[in-house]
Image: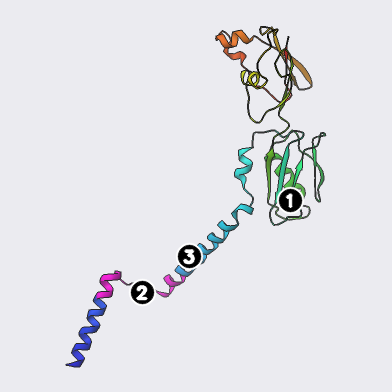
Amino acid sequence: MKMGKRLFGVLLTVSFLVNACGVVRVLPKSDENALLSDTSRTGDRRMMASIAPSLPSDSLDTDASDYILGSEDLIEVMVWKNPDLSTTVFVRPDGKISLPLIGDLQAAGLTSIELRDSIKVLLRRYKKTPEVSVIVREINSFSIFFVGEVTQPGKINLKSETSFLQAITMVGGFTEFADVKKIVLLRRENGREHRIKINYKDIVSGDDPDGNIMLKRGDTILVP
């Protein structure tokens, strides 16, 4: 009788556990090892996520992949696991930067990705597989110049792609003496200076929508 009560109690307990927790599966040894391996990989992924900010990131370079570096730009060079080789530096007026071990290196005229690849090649003399990131921290070289009858003539530092009309608003517009039909944009390309005529009234009236050109580094706008 006591044995029957004990057996009934055991069956009742097992039934309760199965209903409360669902089916209890006993893993074979191979599955158990796989589960432990997955758990280990999950832990590794969590660890990698925790240090991700210090890992080289191509996405940062991709954001600035089309931007051509110039003098006075501030860039950060990061060499993974080598803080002594990592540095933040301005591009000098001669277009070069100075890096530990490497020394002087041309930066102006290159994109951040091109500069990164150049640094990786040079660092292979000292490190087998260097991981390098180049980040543009400040854009200071994308400058244009206004001369003549504008409210605030002089140098303007641009931070993004800017059209002629947008730039006019940045200098406060024209003075009352400006001849807005005879504006000239001076642009130096391939060692030669080009003169582009701009008629402000034709742009705003819609007669010359293509006249609202996008400005480039070093452009000078003359407003007579």
Q: Is residue 21 magenta?
A: yes
Mark 1–mark 2 distance (CA, rounded to whole Å): 52 Å
Is residue 31 positioned above or below 158 on the image? below
Q: Is residue 55 magenta?
A: no
Q: Quadrant of residue 206?
A: top right
Please state the extent of the stretch shown in magenta in the rendering: 16-33
- Helix, strand or loop under label 3: helix
Secondary structure at badge 1 equals loop
Residue 115 position in % (x across, y down): 72, 41
Q: Quadrant of the N terminus?
A: bottom left
Of tags 1 and 3, the one toward the viewer is 1
Q: On residue 38, which mark appears?
A: 3
**Are dots 1 and 3 in contact, CB under 8 Å?**
no
Reading the image, the residue beneath label 1 is 86
Amino acid identity at mark 2:
Val
Look at label 3 and name its amino acid: Asp
Which residue is under mark 2?
Answer: 26
> Of callouts 1 and 3, which one flags the residue occurring earlier in the amino acid sequence?
3
Q: Residue 191: x percent and y percent?
A: 79, 22
Q: Quadrant of residue 31 in the image?
A: bottom left
Q: Does the magenta stretch mainly form a helix, a strand or a loop? A: helix
Q: Residue at x 67, y 13 (%)?
A: 174
Whichever of labels 1 and 2 marks the residue nearer the N terminus, that label is 2
Q: Amino acid at mark 1?
A: Ser
